[in-house]
Amino acid sequence: MLRRPQRLSGSGPMDVEVFARPRFAVLSPYQRRRVAEGALEILERTGVHLNHAGAIELLAGAGARVEPDTTPAGTAGYRVRLPAWLVQQALESAPRQVVIYDRQGRPAMRLGQGRSYFGANMDAPMLLDPQSGQHRPQEEADDARHARLIDALPHLRFLMSAGFAADRPAHLADRYAARQALLNTSKPVLAITLSRASLEAVHAMAAIIAGGREALRRRPFLLHYSEPISPLLHPDESLAKLLYCAEWEIPLVYTPYLAMGATAPCSLAGALSQACAESLSGLVIHQLAHRGAPFIFGAMPSVMDMHSTVFSYGAPELHLLLAGMSEMAAHFGLPNFGTAGCGDACTFDGQAVLEAALSCTFAALSGADLIHDAGLFGSAQVVLPAMYPVVDEIAGMLEVMLGGIPVGDEDAALDLIDEVGPGGEFLTLEHTLRSFRAFWRPALLDRSGYQAWSLAGKPDFAARVHARLRNLLETHQPAPLSPEVVRELDALARSWEAEA
């Protein structure tokens, strides 16, 4: 039900895959159908609550059932119930694949094609300063420094600006954080803003860099993140940003943040169906506003720890459900938003590395496309910059491990094996000299052997991580923008201060 058919091409029964990529599934086809049916029942029987006039007009005009409604908290608005055929129409119009570019206009990520891209969160309310070893509020200079670090790490393919800069006015912090991201990386930027006005300001900055809004529309390097509020609420501001993204074809991540036991049932299947319903209801509004605009499906469903009342960012249930959401995205034929490289640890320690390694591996094996939040810990309240190079190392290993094993004639090397024969050696062969550089080389993991490691002073993993951090901060400079573009961005930033 509500699954878009795959269009396959081939010349006949002899067509075969060159190689398979490692993957696993947490849902059977039957389970995926049950989850999808549950999401549709939620949308048609229970519905969603909203009060945005433009969205209400679109939904009512398209055939949704719209009735006055008041939430248990006393918020007046409308209950909107969506028939299955309306969801199906949205799925048919939304693109199956979304191409994201870098600042130079080169394809950087092809979402929806089965490849996983890891990205880092550059800001949060607090950070663990790698120099002082102390926790403190994150400021704008930290945003710039973190963006440069992420730009330097080859396996972190995008960065996310969450909008924190404690030394800037609260209503402008999201703009200043996004500005530092855009200035200090050539990689795609996924921006969070508090308001549509801030989204418009961030869009204006990206358009200046791209050479105009239409150029940015054609080759987007800016993505936006907005979210419904669980359970089943679409705030006005979230929908205002959703509609703006639809209008300008800014790739939109529309992702609910569910806490089982608080804003979702203590049921894995129930939370999964609710998460699908919340993201899909956003898709319906988005596609009614602009058919074919790029939309990225996903959710962050975890547990509320009843001992601490925090939303766990390292719970196994979170990563199990994220894998389920990845499979549901494939079921619906949509690109997927994943979460990994994060956790509940509040400092750079073994817990942080364990949470990052397991979450990244699970996300990649589940086939998630756009995997965000590397470096975000402390239950999503603390950035650990030391984890950026760690997750980069993990992502590099996973690219090899999930790359599969080609078995073409040249890959099989049967002639070479025959040439060497029993008891021979491959070390001195030209083939070895030509090929060994393709093997992955670690930047942090030690392979030197005991004697060399001991002679080097027995540096531990943490020492190697901090040495790499220092080296990157001292040596890496992002590709510069032209002086004219920087002047325009500076003028735009000065205009923000004049706003009320």
Image (tube, rainbow, N blue to C red):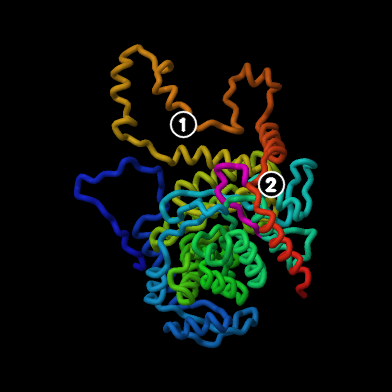
> From which residue to which does the magenta span run?
151-162
450 in relation to 263, above or below: above
Quadrant hosting residue 8? bottom left
Amino acid type at circle 2 is Leu
Q: CA distance from mark 2 to mark 1?
A: 31 Å
| Quadrant, the C terminus | bottom right
The residue closer to the viewer here, 496 or 232, is 496
Callout 1: SS? helix
> Outermost residue, bottom direction?
68
Q: Position of residue 249 (x, y in %)?
A: 51, 67
- Residue 78, disc: none
Is residue 221 visible from the viewing direction of this image? yes
41 relative to 206 in the view: left or right? left
Identify the residue shown where x is 39% and y is 43%.
21
Q: Position of residue 489 (x, y in %)?
A: 69, 61
| Quadrant, the N terminus | bottom left
- How many other residues sit within 10 Å of disc 1, few (<14), some (14-19) or many (≥20)? few
> Outermost residue, front direction?
484
Residue 276 part of the magenta-drawn span: no
Amino acid type at circle 1 is Ala
Is residue 315 visible from the viewing direction of this image? no
474 relative to 204 in the view: left or right? right
Q: Disc 1 marks which residue?
A: 438
Identify the residue shown where x is 77% and y is 42%.
133
254 in relation to 14, above or below: below
Q: Disc 2 marks which residue?
A: 384
